[in-house]
Amino acid sequence: MRAFQKLIEILLNYFSDEKLIEHLGKLKKQIGSILILESAIDGISGIGIVKDNKKILSISVVFNSTISFDELKNLFLEYSISYNHYDEKTILSFQLDNKLIVLAKKDGFFDENEINKQFFSEFEFTFK
């Protein structure tokens, strides 16, 4: 949970894309508009950034440890749940602020009754 909170702090306080990338890690490789970073944050095993026209659109992160649904619910209070049939993942969507949406992803289908027992390690942060 500490790595998650550190990442949220960085995302809410950066002023430019270059500064954000600098705080997140070091560039390992670039494939088109996708940047793969070596994480500068302990507890994160992978970071991928999607850029379009020099602007960051989203950041995908995989944490070393999982975060429970209850911990997420305590941080964000409101959420919506959906299922991506193509990727076969359940997705929880949390609004962090007026420009940032946090998506927690988990393989498989989970309904409202089962989601309370789930743990997440894969997240996507999408900028409006």
Image (cartoon, rainbow, N blue to C red):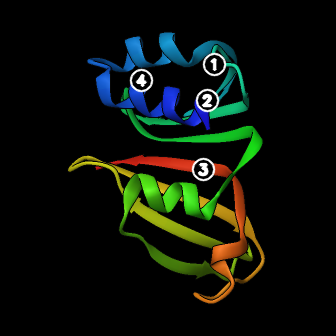
Using the image as rendered, state which of residue 123 and residue 66 is in the foreground.
66
| Residue 50, image x, y percentages | 52, 38
Quarter occupied by residue 113? bottom right
Question: Is mark 2 in CB contact (under 8 Å) with mark 1?
Answer: yes
Q: Does residue 32 appear anywhere in the picture?
A: no
Quarter occupied by residue 95? bottom left
Q: Residue at x 25, y 46 (%)?
A: 99
Q: Secondary structure at mark 3?
A: strand
Kind of residue indicated by mark 1 = Ile
Q: From the viewer's perspective, is 46 left or right of 19? A: right
| Residue 93, image x, y percentages | 45, 65
Residue that numbered label 4 is attached to: 10
Mark 3–mark 4 Cα distance, whole angstroms, equals 15 Å
Using the image as rendered, state which of residue 95 and residue 89 is in the foreground.
95
Residue that numbered label 3 is attached to: 123
Residue that numbered label 1 is attached to: 41
Question: Is mark 1 in CB contact (under 8 Å) with mark 4?
Answer: yes
N-terminal of the two: label 3 or label 2?
A: 2
Q: Does residue 51 appear anywhere in the picture?
A: yes
Kind of residue indicated by mark 4 = Ile
